[in-house]
Amino acid sequence: MWRWLFLLLGALVLALNTHPAQAVTCTAQAHDGNGYTVCAVDMAQEDLRLFLNDTNDVPFGQFGQVNTMLRAKGQHLSFAMNAGMYHDDRAPVGHYIENGTERMRVISNPGPGNFGLLPNGVLCIRKHRADVYETLRYVEKKPDCTFATQSGPMLVIDGQLHPRFLVDSTSRYIRNGVGTSDDGRTAYFVISENAVTFHEFGRFFRDALQVPQALFLDGNISRLYAPQLGRADIGRWMGPIVGVVEDGE
């Protein structure tokens, strides 16, 4: 009898001290002499969302503002990153959907700057999956996205680098982007730890992460919120923000 009581007590202690594995895993990786932080989101387990404006229709702008809103609901961010280019008023430059509502239409024509360096693309978030689509493919397929953000250029398209990327480019910035697995189960959010070219950044997604599709989110203003790494970047006010929401404060 005592033996069974001890076994039961041991099992109870183990259960109380066992925490579920985090489905957002952030790690430091190196590739071709450059450093990167990679946050992998398991879409089967995590609640990945986009955030733009608060209830007063004012852009959140910072990770802290999103967390303040969530904590009032007994939730918090376990990961976040800036999620696409925006105008001076912080409105998205391209297509944007939040909670199933389209806030900005798809922009499919060429234009100035990195966004207009076609092909660009769209990150589409649905229940239990996330996919990066080249924009024209997105328009053709019309996926039913709960959240979507358009940015550009694409970094990797069907396993190939964007055709406009130059090996000997001298344009170097801290850059961030997202790639998705072929089955949509994993989204890889990446920020460089040193200034990199588009060619170097794209090669990291293609060769190190081996994702078939990857999208550039922004450069120079790129920021990361990863409390598991003790990181909460601050700086210029952002437009769209992507993040994983968890229960509890």
Image (spheres, rainbow, N blue to C red):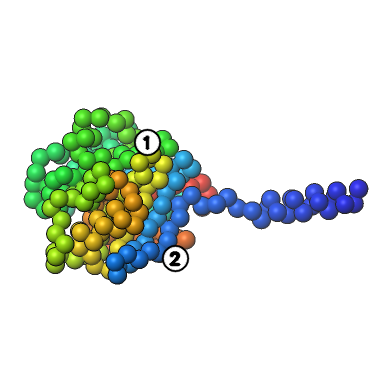
The circle on residue 126 is 1
Residue at the location (14% across, 38% down)?
108
Foreground label between 1 and 2:
1
Q: Is residue 54 above or below residue 10?
A: above
Q: In the image, what residue type sits under mark 1? A: Arg
Question: Residue 16: percent from the left, percent from the top?
Answer: 68, 52
**For this rendering, which residue is in front, 50 or 136?**
136
- CA separation, marks 1 and 2? 29 Å
- Left or right: 21 with respect to 70? right
Task: Indicate the quadrant where residue 107 lies.
Answer: top left
Residue at the location (19% across, 43% down)?
94
Q: Secondary structure at mark 2?
A: loop
**Is the residue marked by circle 1 packed among few (<14), some (14-19), or many (20+) residues within 10 Å?**
some
Evaluate whether residue 86 shows in this view. Answer: no
Residue at the location (69% across, 50% down)?
15
Number of labelled discs? 2
**For this rendering, which residue is in front, 180 or 82?**
180
Q: In the image, what residue type sits under mark 2? A: Gly
